[in-house]
Image (cartoon, helix red, strand yellow):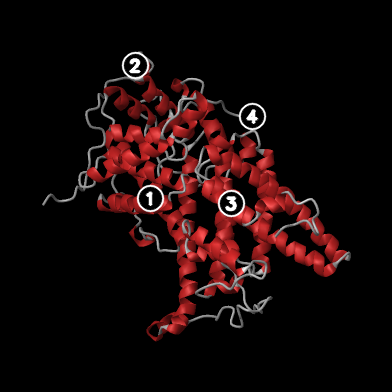
Amino acid sequence: MTPPKTHIEYLPRWDEKMSPGEAMRQFYSSQFPSETREVVIFYFEYFYGICPIFHPATFLCRLIHGSVDPLLIDVMRAKTARLITKYTGRRVDLDAIIENINRRLLLDLESPTFDYIRAVVLMTTLSGGECKFMSYNSLVCLACSMVTRLGWNSLDLCARDAKSIPWLEWAELETQRRTFWIVYQLDAYQALLADRPVSISDARLHTGTPGSDCTWDDISISQILHWPTRHLQSIDKATIINTGALSYTFIDVCDLTVLLSQINQFMWSIRQRTYAKQLPCRGDLLSGMSLFVDYEPDRKQPAVRSSLFELPRFRELHEALQAWCKRLVPADDLKGIGTTLGHFSQFGSLGHRQHQMRVRYFCLHCYYVPFLHLLHLANRPSFFKSSSAVPEFCSSEEYRVLREMLSSSFSGTTNDSLLAYDVVEESWQICLDSIFDLSMFLERNSDISLERSDQITPFCLFTSITVLIRHIRKCRCWIEQNGGGDGGCYGQRVMERSLKVVRQLWAMLKDLGFLWGVRGMEKLLRQMQVEEVINAADLLSGLSL
């Protein structure tokens, strides 16, 4: 039996003497396949910032030398298929490519190469973007297994004198770090949505965040100018902008991922307190307060005597999410700075990095909203029950259908969070405020094309719309109860604002359909009758809710 690999070659059969200029000349020559050139340019322009697991200059040299695994090129082709179809008119059969790639992935499980692992990572992001959640979960588990088997979760467990590491070895370590952190991110997202523990626990995480030297991204430079390098915690936003330090957007995602892992662990721990009452052998988990002790699912207005805000850890996580968002460079500050890619030789130049940075910081603000929602939508009595009662605003059949549709994508706990009406008022208001802030943020940055978004953006729009639909229903009841009084007038103003925002977000989600597989999200929202909400002419009597 062949033992598993613990090390794989980083750059096989690569001519280190080839200059980036010569590689670029050959890349644009008639001898290089035009279709492959098209795929590479589209991938780097639209997806490199999301998943920066390549060193652009050495990747280009390997590509010219013919040492890049064809499987990796095909995965790039699948990632860019929708864009190529839109901009060239040449139809790419995405489903056929995905089926072919999945078959080939199974053939090399026992002997992975560096390119194979990166192909798995990119296919994982594609599966998530196409809403193929069973494939996404399976590929996440495969990627986690490979990076831990290779020890990429412990790259910095034994500190070395970085200055003594040769350039090629340092580049290998840097690429491994980036690949590991992408895998860790994908696992954390899936764990939170699937209501399962993360595959790579914090106790096994001994790999530092990647370096931040901006010349890493410059395709015209074969070796970064200042290495080894590490992320500087004290760097100010102006320096990040002026130097085009694109790597900091990736560092910010790494920081968020650690926080999401902590949120996931917290949500598991508070549920264990409740479920432990039915398991005498787990009595050790019952320390602390009893949550929502008078909750009765059949009550129209549950008597909530407690809130998760009474738990210090909940407040800490809420404040940490807010602090993370405030640390981000505002995409507005980068408006008018940077240039789009005119020629591939400009990739990673200062102007291009600044352009890519604005796109990434735009997306990162969209990361904040749905994860804030998932934290606060758990602040409800029904979160501590094995199943939620049917909300008074829904028929039993409607609720059953919605849960069945949601179950193909999310866990039962997440499903209930997207449908529940018993969220504690303080948390509900935080969710609403984040959506209204998001609406203004999107308007201020409306010049950024939606095709620059990543797969978290549709999820951000989706969770926001589910909150607004529920809020409009609640407002309608409020108006009916208060009539023409002050309470009714206030409820109508709030509903009008919610309707305006839900129209905006619904239009954006549908526009994203060409790039990401959001048809499932659209179907779910139509089942929630979002069209009836948007097209309502009479706010008091015309809402078909």
User: Dot 4: few (<14), some (14–19), or many (≥20) neighbours within 10 Å?
Assistant: few
The amino acid sitting under disc 3 is Phe
The first of marks 2 and 4 along the sequence is: 2
- Tag 2–tag 4 contact (CB < 8 Å): no
The first of marks 4 and 3 along the sequence is: 4
Q: Which residue is mark 1?
A: 135
> Which residue lies at the image location 47% right of the left edge and 82% below the top edge?
286
For residue 462, the mark is 3
Left/right placement of residue 538 relative to residue 260 reads right
Q: Which residue is mark 2?
A: 26
Quarter of the figure that contains the C terminus: bottom right
Is 106 above or below relative to 81?
A: below
User: Dot 3: few (<14), some (14–19), or many (≥20) neighbours within 10 Å?
Assistant: many
The local secondary structure at tag 2 comes to helix
Q: Residue furthest front?
A: 397
The first of marks 2 and 1 along the sequence is: 2
Q: Residue furthest left?
A: 1
Is 66 above or below relative to 458?
A: above
Quadrant of the rendered image containing residue 58: top left
> Which residue lies at the image location 43% right of the left edge and 55% below the top edge?
190
Whole-percent x, y for residue 258 in the image: 45, 56
The first of marks 1 and 3 along the sequence is: 1
The first of marks 2 and 3 along the sequence is: 2
Q: Which residue is mark 4?
A: 336
- Tag 4–tag 1 contact (CB < 8 Å): no
User: Dot 1: few (<14), some (14–19), or many (≥20) neighbours within 10 Å?
Assistant: some
- Regarding residue 475, the answer to whether it shows in the image is yes
The amino acid sitting under disc 1 is Ser
Q: Could you tell me how far apart the alpha carbons at marks 4 and 1 are, in whole angstroms?
A: 40 Å
The local secondary structure at tag 1 comes to helix
